[in-house]
Amino acid sequence: MGAECDADHYLVVVEVRERLAVSKQAAQKFDVERFRLRKLSALEVRKNSQIKIRNRFAALENLNDKEDISKVWENIKENFKTSAKGSVGLCGLRQHKPWFDEECLGLVDQRKRAKLLWLQDPKQSNVDNINNVRREKLVDISGTKRRYI
């Protein structure tokens, strides 16, 4: 199965060399833990998480002022993350929803057949046929995507 872009142009093969640079922000994005903060709207969960955070930070009050600030910050951050994981939990990864199913694949095949017929015999009736097929299949495929989203 080749490229299908629903155009009346002939496809051209081109070799392209490109370099991709990884941005620092994208590399750091994978390390982020996301918490279910919507759970905090429930009063019981909010109170529970406040108690856990207070208990963890009560131990931090006895720290020595001469400790390295980065170690203190790491300690605070880990305490907060641990108590947040216990009370509200982490967000799960979003699941990809494959909306392009066998029905859509059949619609694309019908559109390809109409295009091949038009390329073999470019009569006005075949032009009208391919335009009608394109319009109908685009509406059907868009509707399938909208239903799935």
Image (tube, helix red, strand yellow):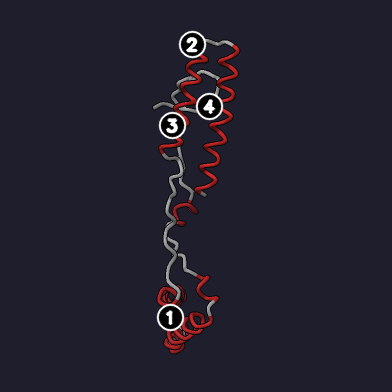
Determine the secondary structure under disc 3. helix
Q: Who is closer to the viewer here, 120 or 67?
A: 120
SS at mark 4? loop
Amino acid type of the residue that numbered disc 2 sits on in the rendered structure: Gln
Gap between marks 1 and 4, in whole Å? 65 Å
Calculate the distance from the C-alpha at mark 1 to the C-alpha at mark 3. 67 Å
Contact between marks 2 and 4 (CB within 8 A): the answer is no
Q: Nearer the viewer, residue 70 or 87?
A: 87
Asked which secondary structure carries label 1, the reply is loop
Residue in view at x 46 percent, y 44 percent? 99
Residue type, numbered disc 3 = Gly
Disc 1 versus disc 2: nearer the observer: 2
- N-terminal of the pair, mark 1 or mark 4, is 4
Q: Position of residue 30 (x, y in %)?
A: 43, 57
Alpha-carbon span between mark 2 and mark 4:
17 Å
Q: CA distance from mark 3 to mark 4?
A: 14 Å
Residue in the picture at 42% in, 71% down: 89
From the viewer's side, name the closer residue of 123 and 70. 123
Q: Which residue is mark 2?
A: 120
Q: Quadrant of the N terminus?
A: top left
Q: Are marks 1 and 3 in contact (CB under 8 Å)?
A: no
Residue 60, image x, y percentages: 44, 85
Q: Which mark is residue 106?
A: 3
Question: Where in the figure is residue 7, as x and y percent of width and height?
Answer: 55, 24
Can you identify the residue that label 4 sits on? 6
